[in-house]
Amino acid sequence: MIRLTHFFALVAALASTTDAFSAPATSLAFSPDGSVIASASGQNVTLLSAATGNETGSFSFDGERALAVDFQPGGSLLAVGTGIPGEKGGVYMVDWLRGKRVGPVATNVDVVTSIAFSPDGELLAVASADKSARVFRVEDYGGKLVSVFALNGHSAAVQALAFSPDGQTLVTASVDRSLKVWSAADGKLIRSFGQHTDAVQALAFRPLVPDRPDAPPYCASGGDDRTVRVWQPTVGRMVRIVRQHDGPVLALVFTPDGRSLFSAGKAGMVRRIDADSDEVLGEFRGSSDWIYALAVSPDGRMLASGAWTGKVSRWSVGEKEINSVPAGN
């Protein structure tokens, strides 16, 4: 039987508080210029200075839980996935530079769990606990969303989704233990992967590597089976398994140069994995509690982690060392 332990624990925590920093930080994203970190926590999205860690702004969402954030590439929009568990889900579009909010756009019948812009910023994919995902077109960069197609086929909550770097495909991951690969052009299912032995919680595509422009895209997935698995979704094969994790993997992110993959989860440890092998290059304690979210700055020099406590931590990323960045620095 597939366990929903993490999802129900998260819903319980969100239902018990409305304060931005006493609910889990469920999603993080760096702005395109790297100056701001957006954090979804409770009923709020908080904007933090990447340089100092200080709050620069916040948005609340009328009694709905904010669970997912993503910045539009090359634009001024921040998409926020929201909802009320078991009742509805939706997306707000925020002009974060001007502090204006557009929406909401109703998208699902349960909370939005993950959102992702396509690399060109023209499409927005939305995953939900209602077992589905949808793709919308962003019209005129003004925040209006027009439904393009639905992605149906999972038998449990869709926990994560990600576009390939070339924007041609979209991968979804679910509590039903599967990954599904879809055409981003028409929403047709290309293939499914079922090698995970428990719920899949996180996805990340490897950025294009400059010295290997013709290499097929690689996608990493992490889940409750305590593994990170690396795939070539367009080819249709699993490349490798990284097993050195002490608990469920809830967050993944590649560095912009495609050389390293960071993982984190229930154990509170952040691990740096060689993107070309299963070698764990190093690890450090990112939190004394669960870590739900990871994000890397566009220049690759800063890693942000979001914990169960709501705290967002910043880490300086070097070639060999990773160090905590104190607030105000």
Image: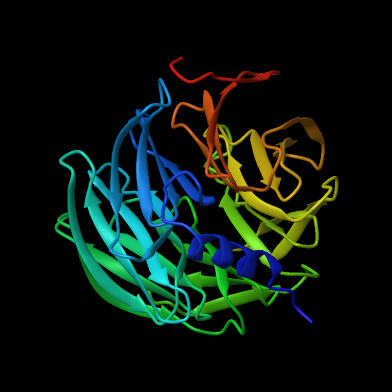
Colour setup of the view: rainbow
Q: In the rendered view, does 98 fall on the left or right side of 171?
A: left
Q: In the rendered view, does 282 fall on the left or right side of 133?
A: right
Q: In the rendered view, does 37 fall on the left or right side of 72?
A: right
Farthest residue to the front: give it. 16
Q: Measuring from the top left, give residue 73's x and y in whole percent.
A: 32, 45
Look at the picture and state if 207 lies above or below 114: above
Q: In the rendered view, does 325 fall on the left or right side of 265?
A: left
Viewport quadrant of the N terminus:
bottom right
Labels in figure, total: 0
Q: Measuring from the top left, give residue 233's x and y in whole percent.
A: 62, 63
In percent of the image, x 74 and y 74: which residue is there?
3
Farthest residue to the top: give it. 329
Seen from the viewer's position, the closer of residues 184 and 70 is 70
Q: Measuring from the top left, give residue 116's x and y in whole percent.
A: 42, 57
In the figure, residue 37 lies in which quadrant? top left
In percent of the image, x 53 and y 38: which residue is there?
311
Q: Is residue 212 at least partly visible in the picture?
A: yes
Seen from the viewer's position, the closer of residues 174 and 123 is 174
In percent of the image, x 47 and y 45: which residue is there?
28
Q: Measuring from the top left, give residue 12's x and y in whole percent.
A: 57, 66
Seen from the viewer's position, the closer of residues 243 and 55 is 55
Q: Is residue 184 at least partly visible in the picture?
A: no
Look at the picture and state if 128 lies above or below 206: below
